[in-house]
Image (cartoon, coloured by chain):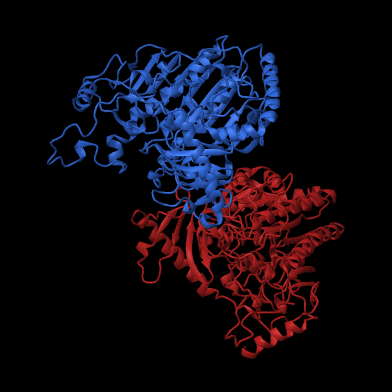
Chain colours: A blue, B red
Amino acid sequence: MKQLPLLTALSCAVLLPAQANDIIHDAEFGILKRQHAQEWQRQDLEVDKKLAEIRKTNGDKRPNIVYFLVDDLSYGQMGNRKMNHVMGVSTKNINDFANQSLSLERMYTEPSCTPTRAAMMTGRHPIRSGSSEVKVTLVGEGLSKDEVTIAEVLSASGYNTAHIGKWHQGDIEESYPHNQGFDFAAFPAHQQVQLSLMTKEAALANNLFGWNESMQNNDFVIDQTFRPNGMVTGLEAKKGGLATEVHMPAGHEWSQADYHAMNVRYQEQALEQLELLADSDKPFYMQYWPLYPLNFVHDQTPNKTRNGGFMVEKLQLLDTWFGEFTAKLDSLGISDNTIVILMADNGLMYHYGGPSGLSQLIYRGGKTDFLEGGIRTDAYVRWPGVIEENSAASDIIHVSDLFTTIARIGQATDNIPRDRVIDGIDQTALLLEGEHNGRRDYVYVYQNEILAAVVKNEFKMHTPTAGMPGAAAPVFNVYRDPREENPHIGMALWSGASFQDMIKRHVMTIQKYPHLPLGKDAPYSGIVNLRPETQKLVEDFNSWH
Amino acid sequence: MKQLPLLTALSCAVLLPAQANDIIHDAEFGILKRQHAQEWQRQDLEVDKKLAEIRKTNGDKRPNIVYFLVDDLSYGQMGNRKMNHVMGVSTKNINDFANQSLSLERMYTEPSCTPTRAAMMTGRHPIRSGSSEVKVTLVGEGLSKDEVTIAEVLSASGYNTAHIGKWHQGDIEESYPHNQGFDFAAFPAHQQVQLSLMTKEAALANNLFGWNESMQNNDFVIDQTFRPNGMVTGLEAKKGGLATEVHMPAGHEWSQADYHAMNVRYQEQALEQLELLADSDKPFYMQYWPLYPLNFVHDQTPNKTRNGGFMVEKLQLLDTWFGEFTAKLDSLGISDNTIVILMADNGLMYHYGGPSGLSQLIYRGGKTDFLEGGIRTDAYVRWPGVIEENSAASDIIHVSDLFTTIARIGQATDNIPRDRVIDGIDQTALLLEGEHNGRRDYVYVYQNEILAAVVKNEFKMHTPTAGMPGAAAPVFNVYRDPREENPHIGMALWSGASFQDMIKRHVMTIQKYPHLPLGKDAPYSGIVNLRPETQKLVEDFNSWH
């Protein structure tokens, strides 16, 4: 267990001049704060008053918070009936939820699973914690114990915490969710490439080539370790304990049926956890990060959607499950004092366009892209009686802002570390007061470790490639050209210079607060029941590491 | 005035076997009817009963019908808040209206103004009436007096009729709306290329090149007639009368201010007409076809939208005007017995992407394209208490279906001619009973006179280019690949053959019922006050004609 930063009795209100206990933000936020400090300070007092009133009406209990994070869907693919018609799917439960919520129409994420989840967990751009890159097999790396997660922040202030589903923050002990602040965690050690793509069914469905040895001509194969076999599947653990691999006998060949069963199990466990958590006097933070809709094989059941693609079919199933989930909140009588956030982690996995049924709808690109299609997702926040239902905001928000905002709402801001840059801006005013109350007008867009684009208001610069003069960097207006196809270039020479200033400030912040390293350890450390095939895989890994 | 087909006392219900008075549809509809005749016959009896009950509750008055047709907007650009956020515009009135309506999510139009409007007016693919092509200057052509328009169909059965705004069906007397069934008409002789693009302001705004002589180097100009000067602008007339050009003094140079004033005038006249029509014992059919949002010059007023593009700004204005229009229906107390249809005539004019502010959002392409972006538009139908509010349907519907459907609702089906092919299918059951009650699963997509694509259910074949084997024709699934970027080709060999059968049937229908010619006459016939510059233009035209 890591050391949490010292708790302090001081309030977290923005004060003038900056106090020693202020959260350290990127320099760009300082530019905004300098222009709006008094107004925000005044508004923060109102927000605090409102939060106190809400607690009072709930018997002094702080709100529960549920974070429902869906994998790989682009903006427009959740919560909008019109887009349902375009896609040939009908996600009534999600749409109804969206209509009860504030729609954050400019939610920016990172372009892929690991970085988005790291950003939300730590409130920091993943580059700062070494978590930018996505891993698909053994790495012996993961989220560092020195990072402070939202689960740790809330846990230290008295929240119960639980994690169910995809985690994807590494394969070493310190990175596991139960060592990052969660009281209970059920999660796969890796992600869906292993669980749904590296299967014989995916090869037969022509969605995977070359992994399954029995379907290859193995002439000239003299390296038996190239194809990873025996990776750990599903894990479960309690806070600070050791993890156990579950439902995976030694020697068993993982199949699509196992993957489906794992999905079903997470849904069941999510509902079970809700029951347990609702029964406590303490408020809870729970995150449920389903593996579906990501999958790579049509499971041969009759199509429920007009679309019929294997990912869209699972989106339809997820809608049913999401409906069960919100119904459970209702039946437990906790919907009113529970904030539910529903969003996706990044754009669609368009590399499987066609048979998957998902396609770029509005913004261009998808997962792994710095284009809007990669980093814009639907995001809905419901808080009955507090957040205006069926409202929407075009204020810019970044997934890391949820860290700071949730901490604020949970009265745990003091647990946010003050020794490092926190990119997440407190957007509580936006949630409570609605559109035009956002405090961010910029996003630094990373693709792995490369700063690939910078957003400011409606303008977006794709950072110049090596050797290209800054004046030639393409600048887009995302309202007029949402697909980023027709750069202003010459017409935007003024903004090129202003964008360069933003990058300079960003780099100065990094120089002052250098990035921290990713955690390193033996892969699968902290797991009690490694199978023989897993032990062999670890030995192979260790032989060259 | 043309001869209307004989009225007949027989009902229009679908009977088995086909009766002499059946509407003649394309062969493809026959394929459907053969499979569903009994079921549709039964449903039609219920629909007739329901329509009779509605009339009864309205003092035996048939419903008024308003057709509000917006120029050049693609699917998603009207009536959806989420898309508003994407575009940076806020069309609250249109969105509210959409929420009170049935959204027809698969409304197909023709790919351009003249053909879509001709299809709706006649219930026929424009190829059948020679109206496929779009004209921008003098042509001496137009919708034939032998075509029977929805205004004539309804007028003959006792409706008052009025047309306000864009018409674009030709520059000859027989083609004018007051000679095609409208009691009153206020309309420009041509369209917006003349009215907003062929101006000095558009040249200064870099949206027009080469038309304005004062901004050209006229070296070597030996033909003074290449640039059309002196075209007729706004016309007004009463049924069967002569037309008068209004608000255009001789010698005046048309400007963006004149264009704006014309738009304002049409809005005022639309409201005035509503007042007059509401005051009659007879029901009315009114169509208001605004010229905005199409325009080509930012008019220097401060932006109202985040987008700020010159077309998006006018879309915002149109939202205000649409709100005034529906408020007028309310204040006249006629909203309940008035069906209001709101849609666009075809996809966006993406050729002005960037400064116009409009861009392809979901479907690829726009005006002039046979791609979904050219021929799919938002379409909303409101009929309070009859059509389920806030409902949506993915049944395929084509703009020509409105002709037949409106005739049915207005009890004027017997006035539909029985001597020619009517492409419009009666979709009354879809409007009244909602999704899954449509009677069309196909669209023949023409680009001018070329059959460019064929739609059947979710499949769309781009017709093979000359010399290409039918088996190589690209076939798309519009749910899985809405942008039509990844054809099935080999995977869709079965559908290639079925699509060829559809085309064969279509061609057989044409052979049996050949296309009728476009009307021809002297340009500007039937206008009483041609200006001297207009007379010169006509003389130039006649010199080679």
Q: How many marks?
A: 0
Above or below: residue B402 compared with residue A281: below
- Say whether residue B533 is left or right of residue A213: right
Above or below: residue B75 compared with residue A278: below
Instruction: Name the foreground residue: A504 vs A476.
Output: A504
Query: Does residue B181 show up?
Result: no
Quarter holding the C terminus of chain A is top left
Above or below: residue A179 compared with residue A256: above
- Say whether residue B370 is left or right of residue A292: right
Q: Where residue A46 sits in the image (x, y, percent)?
A: 71, 23
Above or below: residue A44 compared with residue A179: below
The residue that appears at 55% across and 74% down in the rendered structure is B513
Query: Does residue B189 show up?
Result: yes
Find the residue positioned furthest to the bottom.
B543
Q: Where residue B206 sits in the image (x, y, percent)?
A: 61, 66
Instruction: Name the foreground residue: B260 vs B366.
Output: B260
Quarter holding the N terminus of chain A is top left
The residue that appears at 71% across and 26% down in the rendered structure is A42
Instruction: Name the foreground residue: A189 vs A415.
Output: A415
Find the residue positioned furthest to the top.
A281
Quadrant in which residue B148 is drawn: bottom right
Q: Where residue A423 sits in the image (x, y, percent)?
A: 51, 30
Q: Where residue A3 sits in the image (x, y, percent)?
A: 44, 13
Quadrant in which residue A263 is drawn: top left
